[in-house]
Every structure is written in structure tokens, then in C-alpha cells.
């Protein structure tokens, strides 16, 4: 069996490097398997090879049972190193297979350019700050123009309601509304519980536990119900709008749609935005109910306030406006969430990676804008005195 | 020239199994390194392979072809453990893959290289870092040597040196495949699995990639299992071809397969594209034959 026959399919327990000094000659014997797994044991020894004043170096491969490209490289490097240090080098006992490896693999080695040095941290931070600022500003203007476009198409659809696509509208209403009921209900209920519990704790110090009901009612109806619902919907439906439209962008479905004379704004964006605008007020109403229920359950269990007392205190605490303030915000928030979800979806480029990036961005932007708008509306409502 | 290594006998299947032995077990050229017997794979109620037998000899290039959905890639994925078979035995380098402990499995993983479609490079790492991943994971090579070996691998697959510090997204499709091949060869694998290596490349790029695989296979003594649609690749570098039909494989050289009565195989090799590939292969035969001749496998009875 020649070495060519088991080239690269090596054997035996291990490898050895034997050095022998014979007069003027340094004899290096590469024995066993010179494969990737073995090289770590010899690399240092070969780099620190001491010629011991020998003028002739003989590299003997006759005991070498297998060699792979990594082994060939180390062998080649050693030969070059010995030559560079002025020794006369001869290679004995090599097989054609090893010669091929040396010739085709090791000789082709080229040194890589050094990796690009990272920028000075201060410059890097400044650069990034600048880039992000420009990006955000650009995104802001683009979003604004998309808002204009959406509003235009929205109004046109309202004027020509027969152009609204009913099937996708209903499907999206089901996905964003009906299917969200369990999670929205649970979270609102728990928030009602938490508000009642924390409120009762503080108000008990004044003996004013009954006002826990006021706290829960106003907290849930004015702010918590709508805000939490909007945030859940942004995470649930806004992100799925981006992912759906984004995937269609990646598959060039949106391009195909345009070439067929279908307007993506009308086909993709409108049903989603409409569905959300219709469904979010309903979801908010449901969240309000569940939040109050959570508060009531907590009040009964911990505060000994019966359901009946809770209801009477509730009717004293809130006016119809308290409820309407929460509900009025819902279509606005829905519009923002739907619009941003679709906008980011349409901005997906042709890679799967960008679907993920735009989806994250959609959720973050939607929640951010919802909370900013909520704060502005709070100020507005307190200024006009409701 | 003498070869004292020949005194060492083949460790194949029987005997003590240790993680170390898998890493350095010896298999001789021509011997079967991969044996799949009675393989059955199934997704839900869809049976992909049923009672499939498949084997690969050391040092050969085995092409795997078949119509869409016949489970070519699934076969390779099953062999490398990404997909669990319902039944059957997979023996790689004499070890039953299903019976390996986790440390033996890791040792086994360092003995194969896999090139996925489009390279499957890690997108957050540069090409050089990608090639370094298996070296770091499966060997204790010192950093300086790792660096040199990365340089060797990059030159080996014909990438320009300045590609080393680029990220996969900055490379063309052909360069990504070359980088993927360099990563698959990072540990000098004994067996290389290629999933559609030439898909998505232009004809020139595909031909170059074929000859690269052929050159490396000869120089490194690799065993290659190549899933492909590309008839030119089959003629250019494959020693034998496995055709997936009726949930089984039919194995043979292209000439042998052409005599198979199966209509799909007839259509595949005898169709216009098959004939065109055969003609162009015949034209370059003289040149290819000279190079390939000394390396030819001894014919095995009953293949």
C-alpha cells in the first residue's frame, strides 16, 4: 500500500517529531500522522527549531503515515524556515501524494492583508450619532409623507366604500381583534388587580380604602385600558403586519401586484388599517370591563368591599366622559399602529434579515408614538378641562 | 518508497471505540466509508425514503440526483444528523451513527465537512472568522497556526486575500460558496457533503467550481457526496451517481445508469440537456482522462 492510497484518511495512534544530530547533519523525522488534530503538539517545537550549527538538514518523511493539508503547510513552512536560516535542506521519503499536497496546497499560501483597524472610538461614536440622526430625520419625513398618503387613500376609501375589500377586512378584524381577546382580557384583569392592591395599600393609611374604587376606575378607563391594549396590539398585530407585508416584499409579491395594476396601498394597507381602527375601540371596551372586574375581585377578596358597594362607588367616581376619553384615543392609536406596521413592511428590502429588522423597528416606533400621543392627549384633555 | 504506516491495520467497526479513535481511525481508499442500510425517513405521513440502501467508497465523488422532492437533500441531512430517520442504520467510518455518545459525536463532526446551498456562512462573522469557527471548536491549534491555516484554506479555494476580512453579505454568490467550502475544509475533513454546490452560479462560475472541487478532491484525497441538479457537474467530476427513484437509490457510473430501464433515469440522462452535457464532457474527455487516470478506483465487483 502506498501513501497515495491512504492519503488524508490517516491512522495510528499519534504523531512524533524526532530530532537527531549526526555530525554536520540535523535529521528531522516526521513520524505517524501529521494531521490537523496532531499539529498543536508540534507547532511550537517546529517554530523554535534549533539548528545547533548544522549545515545540512534532512527532513525524513518515510515514517509518516498520513498528512493532510494542514500538515503539508507546517512541513512546507519548516522547510522554508530551515532554508532561510542557511541550512541545506533535503526532503527524503516523501510520496507523490505528499509532493502533490506540498505543490498544490502549501505553495499557494498567500499572506492575508491585516484586518481593517476599527476607527478611533470617539470618531466612531460621533459618526454613529450623526448617521443615526440623519436616519431618524429621514425616517420622520418619510413617515410623515406615508401618513399623508395613508390618510388620502383612507378618505378616498371612505368616499368609495364599495372599493374596500371586505374579505381581507373581516379576516384582519378576526386576527387582530377576536384572537387578541384572551391576552388582552388577562392582562387588563391583572392590571386591575395590581392597581386595586397597590392603591388599597396606600389609601388604607388614611382610612380611605373605598377610594381604591375611584383609583381603579379612573386609572383603567382613562389610561390603562387603552394604553395596554394599544401596546399589546402593537406587539401582536403591528409586528405581524410588517412581517406579512415584508415577506411579500421579499417574494416580490408586492412588485407582482403593482405590475398587475393593483395598488398595494389599497390591497394591503387599507384593510389592515381599517380593521385595526374598527377593532381597537372594541378591544379597549373589553379591556376596560376586564380591568374593572379585576379591581372588583381584588376589592371583594382583600378589602371586604362587596360587588354592590363597588358598583355604587364606581357610579359616583366616574362620568361617562371618563369612559369616552379612553375610547376616543383608540382609533387614533389604531391608525398609528396599523400605519407604522404597513410602512415598515413596505420598506423591507429583498432579504429575510431585513424582515426581522423592520419588524422590530415597527413595534418600537408604534409603542413610542402611541405613548407620546397619549401624553399629548392627556395634556390636551386637562387643558380643555375634562 | 517504503511506508511503515502500512503495518497499521484498519480499524473498522469492531474493536474498542473511543472518541480519539474516531478522530484518527484509518480507512483505506476504495473501502466503504459510508453505509446506509434500510433507511426510512418520513415527514408526517409522507414517506421520503423507504428501505433505502446507499454506500460511498473512500476517495470517490458520489453524485446524488433525483427529481424535485425525492429527498436528495433530506438524505444528506439525515446522514449528518440534522434529520432523524424512522428506521435504518447509518454507518460512517465504521461507526453506527445512532450509537455514538455525545463526545464521539463531536469527534465525528470534525471528520466531515458540509457545504450548504449558498454557503450558509455566519453572517455576523468575516470570512476568516467563519473558517476559524470549526478550528476553534474542534481542535487545539495555537492561534498563530490557525491564522496560517486560514490563509492556506483561503488560497486553496481560490478566494482573493482581501476577501478574508469581508462579511458574507459583501461577497458574490460564487465567492460565498468558495468561503463555505473553505469552512467545510477547515479541519481537513475526510468526507465532504455538498448540497447543490453549483446552484445559482452562472455557467462559467459553475464550471470553475466543479473543477475546484475536482482538484481539491484529488489533492486531498477527499471523499465527496454531492447533491446536484447540474448534469455538467455529474459528467465533470462524479465517479459514480446515485439516482433517487421510488424512495430508493440506484447507484452506478453514468454509463451503467443509462442502461437502467427506469423512465425517469432514461429521461434524465437521455433528454436534451443530458445529451448536451454528455457531448461536452466527451469533448473534454482526453484532457480530463489524463489527469484522472492514475487516481482511478479499482473496479469493484457488483457495484
Image: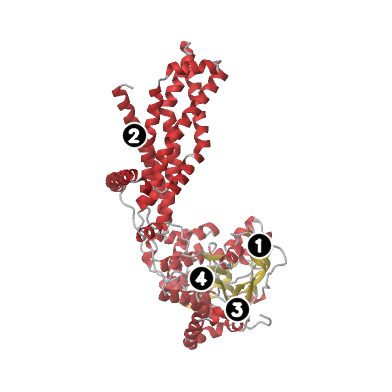
Which dot, 4 or 3, sits closer to the camera?
A: 3
The residue carrying pointer 1 sits among few (fewer than 14), some (14 to 19) or many (20 or more) residues within 10 Å by Cα, namely some
Query: On the rendered structure, is A153 left or right of B277?
Result: left
The residue at 51%/76% (across/down) is B219
| Chain of residue at mark 4 | A
Tell me the residue that label 4 is attached to.
Answer: A69
Q: Mark 2 or mark 3, which is nearer to you?
A: 3
Q: Quadrant of residue A338?
A: top left
What element does badge 3 sit on?
Answer: helix
Q: CA distance from mark 2 to mark 3?
A: 68 Å
Left/right placement of residue A325 relative to residue A37 reads left
Q: Helix, strand or loop at disc 4? A: helix
Scheme of colours in the image: secondary structure
Which of pointers 1 and 2 indicates the residue nearer the eye?
Answer: 2
User: Label 2, on which residue?
Assistant: A372
Q: Which residue occupies 46% across, 45% down?
A: A170
Asked if badge 1 and badge 2 are on a common chain, one would say no
Relative to A121, is A60 above or below? below
Question: Which is nearer the eye, A372 or A28?
Answer: A372
For disc 3, the marked residue is: B263
Check the picture and name the quadrant holding the C terminus of chain B: bottom right
Q: Chain of mark 1?
A: B
Left or right, A139 with reference to B153: left
x, y percent for residue B143: 47, 59
Q: Is residue A186 above or below residue A201?
A: below
Q: Residue at x 53, y 62 (%)?
A: A40
The residues tagged by marks 3 and 1 sit, at their Cα atoms, a distance apart of 34 Å
Pointer 3: residues within 10 angstroms few (<14), some, or many (20+)?
A: few
Amino acid at each position: 500500500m502506498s501513501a497515495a492510497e491512504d492519503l488524508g484518511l490517516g491512522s495510528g495512534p499519534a504523531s512524533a517529531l524526532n530530532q537527531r544530530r549526526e555530525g554536520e547533519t540535523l535529521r528531522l523525522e516526521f513520524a505517524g500522522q501529521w494531521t490537523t488534530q496532531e499539529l498543536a503538539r508540534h507547532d511550537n517545537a517546529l517554530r523554535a527549531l534549533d539548528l545547533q550549527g548544522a549545515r545540512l538538514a534532512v527532513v525524513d518523511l518515510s515514517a509518516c503515515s498520513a498528512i493532510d493539508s494542514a500538515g503539508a503547510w507546517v512541513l512546507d513552512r519548516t522547510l522554508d524556515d530551515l532554508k532561510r536560516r542557511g541550512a541545506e535542506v533535503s526532503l527524503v521519503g516523501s510520496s507523490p501524494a505528499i509532493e502533490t499536497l506540498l505543490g498544490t496546497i502549501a505553495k499557494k499560501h498567500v499572506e492575508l492583508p491585516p484586518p481593517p483597524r476599527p476607527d478611533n472610538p470617539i470618531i466612531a461614536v460621533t459618526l454613529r450619532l450623526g448617521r443615526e440622526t440623519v436616519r431618524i430625520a429621514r425616517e420622520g419625513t418619510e413617515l410623515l409623507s406615508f401618513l399623508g398618503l395613508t390618510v388620502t387613500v383612507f378618505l378616498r376609501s371612505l368616499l368609495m366604500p364599495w372599493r374596500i375589500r371586505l374579505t381581507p377586512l373581516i379576516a384582519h378584524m378576526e386576527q387582530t381583534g377576536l384572537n387578541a381577546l384572551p391576552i388582552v382580557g388577562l392582562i387588563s384583569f391583572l392590571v386591575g388587580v395590581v392597581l386595586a392592591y397597590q392603591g388599597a395599600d396606600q389609601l388604607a393609611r388614611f382610612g380611605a380604602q373605598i377610594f381604591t374604587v375611584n383609583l381603579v376606575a379612573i386609572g383603567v378607563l382613562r389610561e390603562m385600558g387603552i394604553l395596554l391594549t394599544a401596546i399589546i396590539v402593537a406587539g401582536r398585530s403591528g409586528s405581524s403586519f410588517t412581517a406579512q407585508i415584508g415577506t411579500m416584499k421579499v417574494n416580490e409579491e408586492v412588485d407582482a401586484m403593482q405590475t398587475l395594476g393593483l395598488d398595494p396601498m389599497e390591497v394591503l394597507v387599507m384593510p389592515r388599517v381599517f380593521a385595526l381602527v374598527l377593532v381597537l375601540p372594541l378591544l379597549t371596551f373589553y379591556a376596560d370591563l376586564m380591568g374593572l372586574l379585576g379591581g372588583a375581585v381584588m376589592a371583594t377578596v382583600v378589602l371586604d368591599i362587596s360587588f354592590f358597594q363597588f358598583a355604587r362607588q364606581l357610579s359616583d367616581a366616574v362620568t361617562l366622559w371618563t369612559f369616552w376619553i379612553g375610547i376616543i384615543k383608540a382609533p387614533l392609536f389604531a391608525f398609528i399602529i396599523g400605519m407604522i406596521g404597513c410602512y415598515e413592511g413596505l420598506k423591507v428590502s429583498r432579504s429575510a434579515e431585513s424582515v426581522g429588522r423592520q419588524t422590530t423597528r415597527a413595534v418600537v416606533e408604534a409603542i413610542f408614538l402611541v405613548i407620546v400621543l397619549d401624553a399629548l392627549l392627556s395634556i390636551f384633555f386637562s387643558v380643555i378641562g375634562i | 518508497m517504503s511506508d511503515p504506516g502500512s503495518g497499521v491495520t484498519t480499524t473498522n467497526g469492531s474493536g474498542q471505540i473511543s472518541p480519539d479513535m474516531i478522530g484518527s481511525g484509518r480507512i483505506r481508499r476504495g473501502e466503504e466509508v459510508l453505509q446506509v442500510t434500510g433507511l426510512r425517513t418520513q415527514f408526517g405521513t409522507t414517506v421520503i425514503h423507504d428501505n433505502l440502501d446507499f454506500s460511498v467508497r473512500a476517495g470517490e465523488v458520489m453524485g446524488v440526483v433525483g427529481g424535485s422532492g425525492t429527498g436528495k437533500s433530506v438524505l444528506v441531512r439525515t446522514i449528518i444528523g440534522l434529520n432523524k430517520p424512522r428506521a435504518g442504520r447509518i454507518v460512517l467510518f465504521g461507526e453506527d451513527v445512532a450509537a455514538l455518545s455525545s463526545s464521539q459525536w463531536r469527534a465525528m463532526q470534525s471528520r466531515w465537512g458540509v457545504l450548504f446551498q449558498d454557503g450558509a456562512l455566519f453572517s455576523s462573522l468575516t470570512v476568516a472568522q467563519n473558517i476559524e469557527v470549526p478550528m476553534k471548536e474542534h481542535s487545539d491549534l495555537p492561534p498563530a497556526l490557525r491564522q496560517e491555516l486560514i490563509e492556506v484554506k483561503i488560497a486553496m479555494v481560490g478566494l482573493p486575500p482581501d476577501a478574508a476580512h469581508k462579511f458574507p453579505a459583501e461577497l458574490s454568490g460564487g465567492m460565498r460558496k468558495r468561503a463555505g467550502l473553505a469552512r467545510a475544509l477547515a479541519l481537513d475533513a475526510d468526507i465532504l457533503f455538498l448540497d447543490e454546490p453549483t446552484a445559482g452560479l452562472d455557467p462559467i462560475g459553475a464550471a470553475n467550481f466543479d473543477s475546484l472541487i475536482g482538484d481539491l478532491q484529488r489533492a486531498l484525497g477527499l471523499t465527496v457526496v454531492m447533491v446536484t441538479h447540474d448534469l455538467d457537474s455529474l459528467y465533470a467530476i462524479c465517479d459514480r451517481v446515485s439516482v433517487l427513484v421510488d424512495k430508493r437509490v440506484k447507484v452506478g457510473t453514468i454509463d451503467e445508469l443509462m442502461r437502467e430501464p427506469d423512465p425517469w433515469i432514461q429521461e434524465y440522462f437521455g433528454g436534451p440537456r443530458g445529451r448536451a452535457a454528455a457531448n461536452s464532457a466527451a469533448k473534454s474527455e482526453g484532457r480530463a482522462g489524463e489527469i484522472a487516470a492514475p487516481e482511478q478506483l479499482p473496479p469493484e465487483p457488483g457495484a
